[in-house]
Amino acid sequence: MPISPSLAQLPVRRLTSDDLLACADLSENRGWPREEHKWGLLLTAGTGYGIDDPSGAGLLACSVVTSYGPGLAAIGMVLVAERYARQGVGRRLMEHVVTEAGDTPLTLHATPNGQPLYEQLGFTETSRAEMVRGRFTFSTPAPAVPVRPATAEDLQTILRLDHEVFGLDRTHMITRLPAFADHLRVAVEDGEVTGFAAAWPNMDTHVVGPLIARDPATAQALIASLAAAGDRPLRTDVDVRHTALLGWLKENGVDSVASNAVMVRSLPDLPGDWRRRFAPLTVAAG
């Protein structure tokens, strides 16, 4: 719907790490988890945009853009306070973000509620991601692929593998994993790193991501190792084309919660190799 003149005049500003609590408050306002740990990563590694609530009570809208250079930027955490919902604020914020991006291709994960707006702004669905969550039961064993904790010496190898599979350089995100994640694992076969995965804390769960692996067997071994290292339920977002991995996760008590559209703008598809890209670091950052 058209935005009211009073809301249209409110400026969109860049957010900083000082806005972390206001972003978490807005998440909570819309029934999402506060996710302060994730917000901290996104606001330091990416660029946040927000509209201040004229009442002085924090933010009325926000979003975060994570750039991977001129080849791609990911949009996430698009939120509008409940009292301002369905008044055109989300469109206004998204139009600002798209304009700021210029010629840079964009990607995002869209909920069913948000997808129509994104389609109107030129985004098209290229795949889907299934969010799964649950306490890992170890009912169906993982294949016997060697997995061990990553060390500092593995970082350059991880970065090279990630660049190859993701298709773009995300050094600014991957190098934050040792501090951001509780556990970081690598799969090694015949002296070669064939995959890596992290588990990072998010409220009462461990989110598995990124998950990069040579094949489904390697992905399963990485997840099983991460599950054994912690005592929280697992959560991850798996490309629905990875049916074998999704089936195995469900056999182990990690069940479907939601399905979202993976969308792109000014790009036919995401770069890289989806066959080895099983889950994002977070859907908010691609």
Image (cartoon, rainbow, N blue to C red):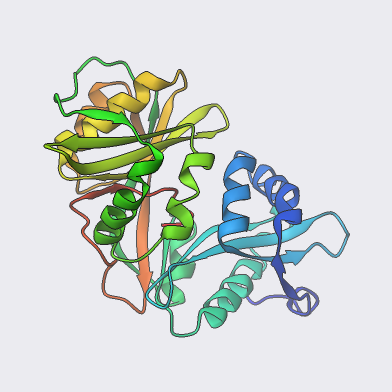
Q: Quadrant of the N terminus?
A: bottom right
Q: Reply above or below: 270 against 103.
A: above
Residue 142 picture location, percent across and down: 19, 24
Residue 85 picture location, percent across and down: 66, 59
Q: Reply above or below: 286 against 268.
A: above
Q: Quadrant of the C terminus?
A: bottom left
Q: Reply above or below: 201 against 114.
A: above
In the rendered image, the residue lying farthest to the right is 55
Residue 261 picture location, percent across and down: 36, 56
In the rendered image, the residue lying farthest to the left is 190
The answer to which of 46 and 191 lies nearer the viewer is: 191
In the rendered image, the residue lying farthest to the front is 153
Q: Residue at x 58, y 62 (%)?
A: 64
Q: Tell me where residue 53 sits by quadrant.
A: bottom right
Q: Answer with left or right where residue 239 lies relative to residue 227.
A: left
Residue 246 picture location, percent across and down: 24, 36
Q: Is residue 135 visible?
A: no
Q: Answer with left or right where residue 205 lies relative to residue 44.
A: left
Q: Answer with left or right where residue 119 lies relative to residue 250.
A: right
Q: Residue at x 28, y 25 (%)?
A: 224
Q: Residue at x 36, y 27 (%)?
A: 226
